Image (tube, grey):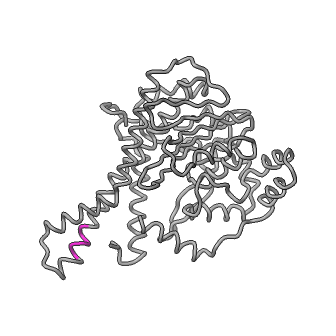
Amino acid sequence: MNLFTSEIEQLNFDTEKEKKYNSYLGRCSNKCIIQDCENKAIYSHVISEKRYLMNISRGGHLIGIVSKRKKNQKYLSIESIGIQKASGFSGFCKNHDSEYYNIDCNGLNTYYDLLFQFKRVLYKHLYYHNYYKEYENDFATIWLTKFVNLISKKLNICINKLTHLYKEEASRKFKKYHEIENYIKVEIENINMLIDSISKSKKLDDESVLSHEDICFYIIRKRWAIKLPCALDAGYYYYLNDVLLAFHFCILPENDRTEILMILPKNDPADINKKIVKQMEDDLGILNFCEALLMSSENWYISPEVFDTFSDKKIKFMKDDLYFINERTFYNEYDMSIFDSIRHDIIKLYDKSVVQNERNKLINFPKRASSEDRMTKFKEKIFST
């Protein structure tokens, strides 16, 4: 059932929803997200400001994605963002945030550090999903009101029957959100179990894998010898044969290298993990994979120096692709170059066939369907969920 009589009505509802969403994420009146903690939350960074974000900033600013609206039309802007606003949320109280002080100062040196970084990431994702509880109430209220108005005028159906139907619809609409929220909670419990069982001094290798028979995922750390001027924190959730698969990634830029962190599900009927691991075997594969992550998420920041090299055409192309994010998956190679100078340096070591393909990414813009066709498919995807 379509709740809205026109696109304008739906856009107005989405605008108010987005305002409430931004207010929820930005306010500091929240309690700490840690269970049973009653302390007030503070604003803090998931990706450390001092350890990582400063490495790619200029004058206290980064380049990132900002969602905006012009009248009733939503659009994305790639623009300067103050470093204080990057990768932040009001989830932890001061005491619980202090647990991450060591990794903010010293980086990731042990398995213990790696677990704490992902613990912080997962709590942020849980914090974001808590918002949908508020959105669900708004949605359900509108749905019930419209359902009563549309149907009770034509049919002699009691309000109790309508209320039951509305609850079923609200439950169906938000079932996946609740399943994802519960899955993240399980992941956090598993992380805490590993933290309690692992030695605090066990050192990480440049390529490290952490798992346990009682947990449902692998944790992988890849230290890349090349510095990618990008910071990213992204989560992807897929249903395959009614099975929820959750993938989490962090890109953390150090002074002269890059930390790439992954949580991959053990239950992987589509063999997505194999595709990811295969891409991580050499420098070009890693670059392509990081670019694919960037173009499949809005939770990233790049250095202003890189952005300065982008043409207006490239910026518009990226904004359009990010808007129609449903067209891509994070594990498939993106067909245009983002980090041109790094690509130039890397491809010197490859044979001619590889070089030609990569040069095409540098020179040519891929073909895309018309904006009208892309929008039609985008709406079909949205309204089918």
Q: Is residue 227 left or right of residue 209?
A: right
Q: Is residue 30 magenta?
A: no
Q: Position of residue 231 (x, y in %)?
A: 62, 43
For the point 62% across and 41% down, the residue is: 251
Q: Position of residue 287 (x, y in %)?
A: 71, 46
For the point 67% across and 44% down, the residue is: 278
Of residues 365 and 271, the one nearer the viewer is 271
Of residues 167 and 285, the one nearer the viewer is 285
- Quadrant housing the N terminus: bottom left
Of residues 228 and 380, the one nearer the viewer is 380
For the point 65% across and 35% down, the residue is: 222
Q: Position of residue 328 (x, y in %)?
A: 59, 60
SS assignment for the magenta stretch, majority: helix
For the point 18% across and 82% down, the residue is: 154
- Specify the quadrant of the image occupied by residue 124: top left
Q: Is residue 145 magenta?
A: yes
- Quadrant housing the C terminus: bottom left
* Segment colored magenta: 144-149
Of residues 152 and 49, the one nearer the viewer is 152
